[in-house]
Amino acid sequence: MVRRTNIALVSLAALALAACGMDPQEKFARAQGNFTAHEYSQARLDLVSALEGQPEDVAMLKMLAQVQLKLGDAEGALFALERLEKAGGKLDDPILFRAEAEILRGRNDDALELLQGDKRADAHRLRALAMVREGKFDEAREELKRGMDGTGPKAELQADYAQFLMADGNLDEGAKIAAMALAAAPDALGPQIASAVAAERRGQREKALQFYDKASKSYPESSTAMIGRIRQLGELDRVDEAEGLIKAAVDRSPDDVDIVFLAARLDAEKGDWAEARTRLQRVESRMREYPDAQLLYARSLLEEGQVELGRSILRRLNARFPEHAQSAALLAEVLLSQGDPAGAQKVLTPVVAQEGVPEAIRQLYRRAETQSAGRS
């Protein structure tokens, strides 16, 4: 495992051609600037290159460990930590660092063991993250709630808890806690995103865009901030601005399902269903948790005349998310077109039982009901 990470670091060093001609301290200085600007990928390139010349520099190794963790590279982070400790250095908080790295590489039980008995807010936040990774959402919510009384900085935990509350439909309380997080750490990513989500859920598109704009510019490698920014531009009909951002995002993260979905949605809005289908087809195996992306894929297949395949995807989607209104409606339309009004009525029944269902879907249900009754 360590050997694989070492190979990866050597490869990164080979890529750092822009650092040629600079001495290790100059590269480190540039890495520090990029780290402060949250340009972690660029910081990593300079750090790896600088460490080729000064392999036991404690300050460089410490920053490299932090950068690797920020980039989600758990193995690289732990390898850098190992090098740091061998060089006689140490992190400010190795327990939280190791716990987060263990979560990133799927060792949630190891993370929970490391954090056992830790009453700090950040420990509660990481325990909740480990629980989420295990699908234990109720336990995670309670862990975040306990963390509100934890010690130490709380802004990131508050931001996570606010998002949990809003996802549960408790918008007012979630927005209140998001505001608390933002007041405590106005420049941190989590509080900015939570505040953007609160504004978005209240229909305050311009305000949400302002938060996403700031977050995206301050944290240029955050896909969450970028995607939120693009989404708001789309909602505000500022398609030209959104299109440029989408193209840049696709170039940077061509396999990110969220970004591919946004690009495909833009294709669909232009009427280019073939391109939308092609994009989504490339990530089809990873759309399981993305009902909106699956819906768009099914719609693109229907538009391209691949009705049976489109219906098959809609069937699977409806079986897993029976209350997803738009996918149920599209499946019902397909079933009606194929002479199966009873089937259309069946898939729409759990949808129309909800509050706030669009009138068009209720009308579709009544049409299916009428046609079904006429056949009996």
Image: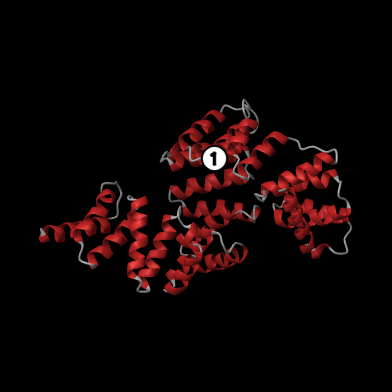
Residue shown at the point (80%, 65%) measured from the top left: 17
Visible residue check, residue 180: no
Q: Is residue 28 left or right of residue 96?
A: right
Residue 182: % across, % down: 58, 41
Residue 45: % across, % down: 76, 57
- Local SS, label 1: helix
Amino acid identity at mark 1: Asp
Residue 225: % across, % down: 57, 53
Q: Quadrant of the C terminus?
A: bottom left
Q: Is residue 48 left or right of residue 73?
A: right
Q: Is residue 205 left or right of residue 49?
A: left
Q: On the image, numbered disc 1 is attached to which residue?
A: 160
Q: Nearer the viewer, residue 120 or 51?
A: 51
Q: Based on the displayed image, in which of its 4 quarters is residue 305 positioned?
A: bottom left
Visible residue check, residue 325: yes
Residue 317: % across, % down: 37, 56
